[in-house]
């Protein structure tokens, strides 16, 4: 699992929990009662904590995208250098095949 997918998974789950506990408190309470959870839950606290977690995961997602893009640029530069070196080698082989000195 890459950092991008990890932070994306955390972001999606925390935003959905935040929305669920902030906007749909009645439906959430009925659902929790139906599955057998009868504890007194502070919905605003859960919503706030999941909102903070979503903010941190969004920041982590942005940082992960930045480092992935930076790594891709380094890889593309390395490929370009290898391509140039390969062209030089081909030119040298062609010159040797024609009997010229390099």
Image: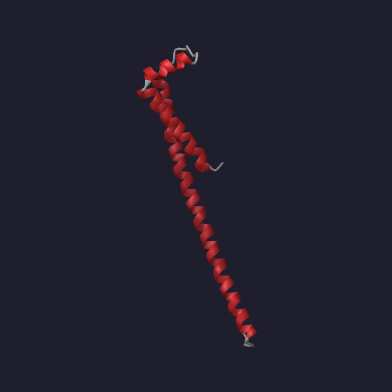
Looking at the picture, how far across and down is residue 38, in whole percent?
Answer: 47, 11
Q: Quadrant of the N terminus?
A: top right
Depth check, front residue: 5 or 66 = 5
Q: Quadrant of the C terminus?
A: bottom right
**What residue do we see at 45% from left, 35% from top?**
11
Look at the picture and state if 95 lies above or below 87.
below
Look at the picture and state if 63 lies above or below 81.
above
How is the rendered protein coloured?
Answer: secondary structure
Depth check, front residue: 81 or 29 = 29
Looking at the picture, how far across and down is residue 28, in whole percent?
Answer: 41, 19
Most extreme residue toward the front is 34
Residue 94 vs residue 9: left or right? right
Image quadrant of residue 88?
Answer: bottom right
Looking at the picture, how far across and down is residue 75, in whole percent?
Answer: 54, 58
**What residue do we see at 45% from left, 30% from top?**
14
**What residue do we see at 46% from left, 16% from top?**
32
Image quadrant of residue 40?
Answer: top left
Looking at the picture, how far across and down is residue 17, in whole percent?
Answer: 43, 27
Residue 97 vs residue 69: left or right? right
Look at the picture and state if 55 lies above or below 71.
above
Number of on-image labels: 0
**What residue do we see at 46% from left, 31% from top?**
13
Most extreme residue toward the left is 23
């Amino acid at each position: 699992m890459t950092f991008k997918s990890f932070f994306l998974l955390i972001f999606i789950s925390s935003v959905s929990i935040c929305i669920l506990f902030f906007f749909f408190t009645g439906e959430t309470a009925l659902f929790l009662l139906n599955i057998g959870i009868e504890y007194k839950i502070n919905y605003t606290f859960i919503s706030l904590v999941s909102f903070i977690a979503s903010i941190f995961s969004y920041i982590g997602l942005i940082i992960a995208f930045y480092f992935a893009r930076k790594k891709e640029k380094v890889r593309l530069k390395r490929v370009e250098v290898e391509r140039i070196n390969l062209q030089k080698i081909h030119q040298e082989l062609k010159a040797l095949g024609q009997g010229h000195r390099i």
